[in-house]
Amino acid sequence: MEIPPPEANGAPAIGVIGGSGLYEIDGFENARDYEVETPFGPPSDTIVGGTLQGRTVYFLPRHGRGHRLTPHEINHRANIHALRQLGVRWILSVTAVGSLKENYAPREIVLPAQFYDRTSNRAGHTFFGGGIAAHVSFADPISTHLRTLLAQTCSMLRKAYHSGGTYVCMDGPAFSTRAESESYRRQGFDVIGMTNLPEAKLAREAEIAFATLAMVTDYDCWKTSEDPVTAESVVSHLRANANTAREVIAHVIPRIPTEPNWPEHTALRTAIVTAREYWPQETLDKLRLLLDRFA
């Protein structure tokens, strides 16, 4: 990995995960690509780094440029680890979701506070194992401070948004059946997607403050008065949503603090349960970025 430039103003970097077009933001300067190697393999694509509003920002397209990766093919561990290697301590995760609520319309923004896990890849959702066990607190999976900044920014920009609620994360890549969609609605969930939960779990383990900027593209398939969701219909809303996301990101970046002193930034302090003398050297070497201060 090439050594990144010093962080702007001496502040840790901010990461943005989403579509490859998000880094085309007015005011984004000194852009360059970074090929990052991680102990967990390569991330989804090269990471674009530069400065925005006086802050160092790195953009990572989670599905790769050209949307080449399906949800189950994304190497979330490599993605989050790569951003942490670059000095990222805050992540804004921009993601497309289906709405499970009548009043959460396509092209509106949802800032969920909770997740409900319907995925199955447990090994790929944690950095730990291999002789070192850790259990991070995850009762509040979204950074409250970062979500508040996003809500304030959406309000200032007069965007249609909803703050709070639950994102249910499914495996995909197929969309929901009607029975599944109705079940999620009865349970009171608000939006549905395929990628955001593992990002949130790994960000917490990497001691990165994380918040989701969910962009509604469809009503899933529960709303029988409309056609079921298709990839074609999602893409049309994605293009419009990308413009909104870029505007929100550009305005929220300068409001993010320069000191990483939120609760998420010390999440591992009370999470590691394996005594130091039992840590296998191979696993410690793999997790040194996360564990150096405990070693």
Image (cartoon, rainbow, N blue to C red):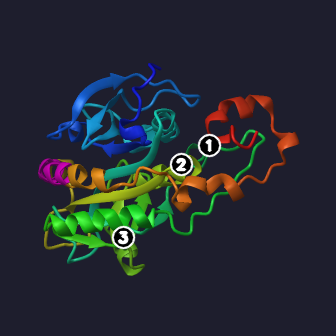
Outermost top residue: 2
Quadrant in the picture for residue 169: bottom left
Q: Residue at x 36, y 64 (%)?
A: 147
- What secondary structure is found at the residue carrying circle 1? loop
Instruction: Tell me the kind of residue under disc 2.
Output: Leu
User: Which secondary structure dominates the residues rendered in magenta?
Assistant: helix
Q: Which residues are magenta?
A: 235-247
* Total residue callouts: 3
Mark 1 sits on what residue? 127
Q: Is residue 177 visible?
A: no
Q: Is residue 244 magenta?
A: yes
| Residue 77, horizontal then vertical, whole percent | 52, 39
Q: Is residue 70 magenta?
A: no
Q: CA distance from mark 1 to mark 2?
A: 7 Å
**Comparing marks 3 and 2, which lies closer to the viewer?**
2
Instruction: Tell me the kind of residue under disc 1.
Output: Phe
Q: Residues within 10 Å of mark 1 (few under 14, many from 20)?
A: many
Mark 3 or 1 closer to N-term? Answer: 1
Mark 2 sits on what residue? 202
**The C terminus, quarter of image:** top right
Mark 3 or 2 closer to N-term? Answer: 3
Describe residue 218's horizontal placement relative to residue 284 as left or right: left
